[in-house]
Every structure is written in structure tokens, then in C-alpha cells.
Amino acid sequence: MGIIMADPKDQTKASEKKAEVKAEVKTEEKKEGKKEETAVKLVLDPVTGEQVSKSELKKRTKQREKMKKKDEEKKIAKESTKKEEKKQKLEDEKSEEEMDPRLYFENREKWIKDQKDKGKNPYPHKFQTSMQVSQFIEKYGPTTEKDKFLKEEVAIAGRVMTVRASGAKLIFYDLVGDNNAKIQVFASAANHQDGVFKDAHANIRRGDIVGIIGYPGRSKTGELSIAPKSIMQLSYCLHMLPTSITKLKKQETRYRQRYLDLIINPGVKDIFRVRHNIIRSVRDYLSKKNFVEVETPILNTIPSGATAKPFATHHNDLNLKMFMRIAPELYLKMLVVGGLERVFEIGKLFRNEGIDRTHNPEFTTCEFYMAYADYNDLISMTEELLSSMVFNMFGSYKIKYHPNGKEPDEKGVVKEIEIDFKPPFRRMPLIESLEAKLKVKFPTDLESEATRVFLEKLCAELKVECPPPKTTPRLIDKLCGEFLEVECLNPTFIMEHPQIMSPLAKYHRSKPGLTERFELFVNYKEIINAYTELNDPKKQYECFLSEAKAKDAGDEEAQAIDENFITALQYGLPPTGGWGFGIDRFTMLLSDTINIQEVILFPTMKPDVAQIRFRNKTSHSQLLSLIHI
């Protein structure tokens, strides 16, 4: 059999095909190898979450470290700047503190006199502002950028509280305006356009009032500022202000010089904003219920309307002894008789009594009288008014209060309590609650001598002190204070007082010997006194006679007989509810203060003995010579 030879062409094709397959296999292997190689080299970027090569990650890490280092350097530089500014401020204050106060005063006084001698007016009549400091903050605070000042021009004024020079051509001030609003003044010679920069700023001191025309913006440190193109002194603080070193904490100085207290201690202004909001809330509430606000006399010929000792004075022209009002009650009820069915008055009362943390001889109340209402209506109105007022001011019915003040005690503890104004408020009938608390039964006839003897003996047994005269109203009042008021942390109505304690209140319609009256206590202090008004002229006259007997027995706080009011009742007082609210004490609660003098701008104080002696020894001409501005 012969051998068949393969076609050379077929062999070539087969070889080529085999080579192609082999090449393809190698290519695939190469690709797979690259994939594996790539997969091995990719790593996770922990910041972005991406898969990157080691070299890319290394590059990014270096860049990030570089940026972090820069940020830290900026932070250190910023903190250093702040420290330097603080240091400079303390040094400035220390330097000022070391100066003799009298010399400081004389230097300032002399400079002002020199200005007048040169024909200049150091006290300009007017500076036209375009906005207040608080409005400046509200408008430019959210919009201005760091290290940038707008071309927009504004005019503002305020009091300079700090002065910090940073060389001859850059000075920083803290400018304080309304509502404790504060901005920085970035005074640079580069921006100054009105005269010589040095001359304009040479005599500006802490406490001076200045007017500024300039540009709003922020400094390099991000501080909201105004860059003045001109600055004008409008008024001068001739005395050295207390500094952050010396401060102003002495109560007597703060109260005698309230203007200084307001300048140095910004928190004091907040107290009087709380007071303003309370008065506004009461006024708005009553106005919405169609009450008319009125004014009644402060000088009276008879001290009536409340149980209190009055201040006496003398009217020279009429040769008449007069009294400062202890309450506006009788006048307001006369107006209801006249047809003003809903009236109220917010004003001052004067009672010649002791001064302590909750009593000041001159204080502020709101009284309203509402025809065709009784004490049940007044209870509902009280709950509605106070709970809504607290909620609107604090966003909650609950407030925090520090009964011993905000400073730590000897053990380093700051006592804090919570007071809840959520209605309804607790009710506590006076006599029933005392009987339950003391486990005794009071005599039925509360106006008898037997009852007075019983109460005197009870007070002695319970060691409750009651200074003479030991009348029934005073004895019951002492027992109430000792055993009931001490339970009134949250708002509590102590109700249904005996008639003998309430000469102007109407008798209870179902409980003989008691009245339709309540007192609201909060934090153990009386805040509101209210009742259904007595409108029987004969019965009212009898109550006045009982009060007159108590006055004859030595009770200086007992009420006098007001014949004019009795005559008014004879014309007909409709069924009426009357309500009195102590604004000062309630301000103490909502402003978290423990002294009534803190919530009265100018509280009653003993005269400054040193000043009296100085005035008595110094003639009028001598006084004028001391003030030679």
C-alpha cells in the first residue's frame, strides 16, 4: 500500500491556526494576569470610600496631612490672636485701673473744657443713625463673609466698652447698643476719611458714647464689625468704669447707681425685659377682654382699699393731712358704679412697712374690676392668664428657679426647684385646711371673743408667734403662713377666708362666716388677691366699723371708714369680681431673682450718709466750683 502524503498547504494552515489559538491563550492569560495585578494593587480610600492605587492613596494622604497642618496653623494663629487681644484688653484695663480715679476724672474734665475754650462743642445736639446695633447684627450677621467689608454705608451709635490698640493705625472697640447688642469696631487708618485718624481716636475712652459712619463686614477672625470712615464722640464717661478685674457686684452700689449697674452688668437689662413682658402680657390680656385702662389718685384723704400702714404727707395750700395710696380699689369700684363695667389700673402703691427680700415700700400692682363676675370667674381668668404668659415666654408651663440664688453655697451646691404653671391650679380652703392640718375644730362664730381666745391659745401651743395686737384676723393669718403657705410651691389658691379677715369681700353664698375670696401663692409667696366684691352698702359700713375697732385696739394696718365709698355703693354696684396682682414678685419668679430690689429699677434705700454730710458742709457755690466743665 503506498503512503499518502499530506498537502503542504493544509499543513501550513493547521500550523497557523494552532499558532493563533496559542496566541489567543497567551493574550487571555496576559489579560487575566493584568486583572489580577490590578486587583491586588487597588486599596480603599478611607475618606472617600473609593478603590484607588497605593500610589494615589499615598498622594492623597500627603495632601490631606498638608491641609490639616495648614488648618491647625490657622487655628493656632487665631487662638493666639484672641489670646493677644484678651491679654491686651486686660493690660489696658489694668493700666486704667492703676490710674488714680480722681486724676482720671480731672484729665477728662480738663480735655472737655479745652474743647469748649477752642470754640468746639464736645456734646453734639444730634447724630443721625440709620439703624440700631441690634438691627445691624440682625441684618449683616447672617450675610457678611469673613475678612470682607461691604461697600454699603451705615450709621450707628453706642457705648464703647473696650479699647484695644494694635499699633498706631489700627484700633478695635467693642460697641454696645440696645438690648445688650455688641459689635466690633474695626478702626483702620486706611478706611478713615474724616480728618486725622490719630486725632479722631486719641481721646475715646471706655464708657464714651460714639457715632460711627462706616461699612459692615467681618474681620480676619470672623468678628462681625463696622469699619468706620468717620467716628464722632457724642458724650463722655468722665468716671473710670469698673473693669473685668474690679467688676461691680456690691448690691448697695448697684442699686444706688442703677445706670452704672445697667452699663456694667448686661444681665440686669434682661430682668427688666422680663418685667416689661409681664406688664405687656397683662395689659394685652385685659384689653382683649374689653377692659378700659384708667388712672386713679395717688394722694388720698383716707388710706383705704387695703389692710396696710400708709405714708402720711401734708398739703400746704389746703392745710390738709393726706396719704399716699395703699390701693386703688375703692376708686376703681366707684368707676364700675358709674358704668365702666370693666376697668383696670397698673400703677404704684405705697405702704409704710418693712423692707426685706420680698417687700419694698413702693411697689407695682395691677388691679381690675369686672361687673357681673364672681371669684369663680376670676380663678379661671387667673389660670388662663398666668399659664399662657409663662408658656409664651418660656415655651413650657415649667420654669426653673434658684431659691437661694445662683451662686454656690458653702458646700458648692446651687439649689434648683421647678415650678409648674400648668392649669388647673391647686385649691386649698383656708379654715378647712387648717383644721385638717392641725387636727382641731375651729369655733363656728369666727367673730366672737371665744374664737380669738381659742386661736391665741392654739398659737401658743404650736409656738406660732403673733406680735400684739393679737386679733382674730392676725392670729389666723399667722397660722396660715406657718402651716398652709409653706405647701404652696406650685401655684395654689388659698380660698374662702373668714369675713373678719376680708372687709371688702362678699360673704360666701353657702358657707357662713366665710367669703368668696382667694389668694394665689407661688413659691410660698402671695402673688394675687381676689374676691367677689361686697356691694351691700349697709354690710360694707358694718365691716368698716369692725376695722375701726381694730385700729382703735392698736392695729395700724386696719382700714379706715370711707364715707364717700359707702355713698357710691348706695347708687348701686353690680355683682363684681375684683383682682389684684403683684407684678414685682411675679417678675422675681420669672427672672429667677431672690431679692425684690433686683426687679425694681430704683428701690427704696437708706440715704448715703457720706453724701448727706458732704452736701450739708458744702455751699451751693462750692458745689458749682467743683463742676467746672
Image (spheres, rainbow, N blue to C red):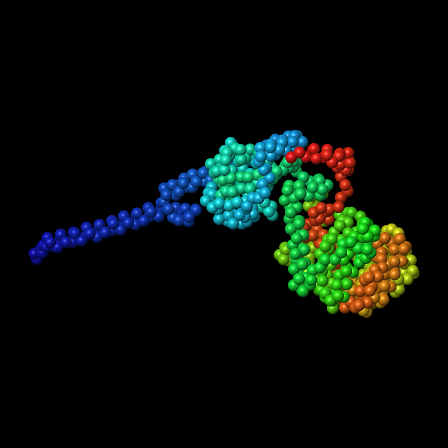
Query: So how many labels did they put on this image?
Result: 0
Question: Which x, y percent locates residue 140?
Answer: 51, 48
Q: Vertically, is 13 above or below 287?
A: above
Question: Which x, y percent locates residue 226?
Answer: 51, 42
Look at the image and tell me whether residue 65 can be seen: no
Identified at 71% across, 40% down, the residue is 253
Q: Vertically, is 148 above or below 343?
A: above
Question: Which x, y percent locates residue 555?
Answer: 87, 54
Name the image quarter holding the C terminus. top right
Depth check: give the residue in front, 96 or 477.
96
Depth check: give the residue in front, 8 or 249.
249
Q: Vertically, is 618 above or below 325?
A: above
Look at the image and tell me whether residue 625 can be seen: yes
Identified at 59% across, 36% down, the residue is 205
Depth check: give the residue in front, 390 or 13.
390
In the image, taking residue 506 as reference, residue 278 lies left or right, namely left
Res 207 quadrant in image:
top right
Identified at 72% across, 65% down, the residue is 340
The outermost residue toward the left is 2
Name the image quarter holding the N terminus. bottom left
Question: Which x, y percent locates residue 172?
Answer: 54, 37
Identified at 63% across, 55% down, the residue is 394
Depth check: give the residue in front, 430 or 260.
260
